[in-house]
Amino acid sequence: MNVIVDLCVVPMGVGVSVSRYVAMCQDVLEEAGLKTSLHAYGTNIEGDYDEVFAAIRRCHEVIHAAGAPRITTTIKMGTRIDREQTMADKLQSVAEKRAAAKLSS
């Protein structure tokens, strides 16, 4: 089953800047071969459910190994079985609806 996840990993006890740890997690996700889209407060990920969650676990392992004593993670996720849908499909659907609304105005 495929999943689309919005992931926000926040290392605690490492100071104010966490970009070093975000970069580590991005490397893990890339190495896992997952499709990602980094944004200002997290990362969207799409892929096989088990592969995505294995990579999230690996993010935790890598960040802990780098010295973060604690991590808090927020995950929003969605799955669907009625049809395949990608992150790009979801964005395209919104863009089409916005364009149609502008034409009808």
Image (spheres, grey):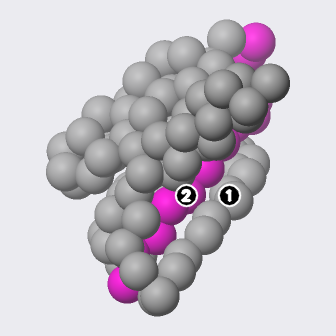
Which residue is the site of mark 2? Answer: 5
Q: Which residues are magenta?
A: 1-16
Give the answer, above or below, for where 100 lies relative to 7: above
| Residue displayed at 63% across by 36% down | 100
Tag 2 near tag 1, CB within 8 Å? yes
Other-residue count near label 2 (Cα within 10 Å), few / some / many at <14 / 14–19 / ≥20: many
- Tell me: 10 left or right of 46: right
| 63 on left or right of 27 | right
Tell me if residue 10 is in the magenta stretch: yes
Q: Is residue 78 magenta?
A: no
Q: From this viewpoint, which residue is outermost toward the right?
A: 105
- Dot 2: what SS? strand
- Give the residue type that dot 1 points to: Ile
Looking at the picture, which amino acid does disc 2 mark?
Answer: Val
- Is residue 34 something that shows in the picture? yes
Q: Is residue 68 left or right of residue 62?
A: right
Residue identifier under label 1: 75
Q: From the viewer's perspective, tell me whether residue 94 is left or right of residue 28.
A: right
The alpha-carbon separation of the residues under discs 2 and 1 comes to 7 Å
**Residue drawn at (43%, 51%) of the image:** 89
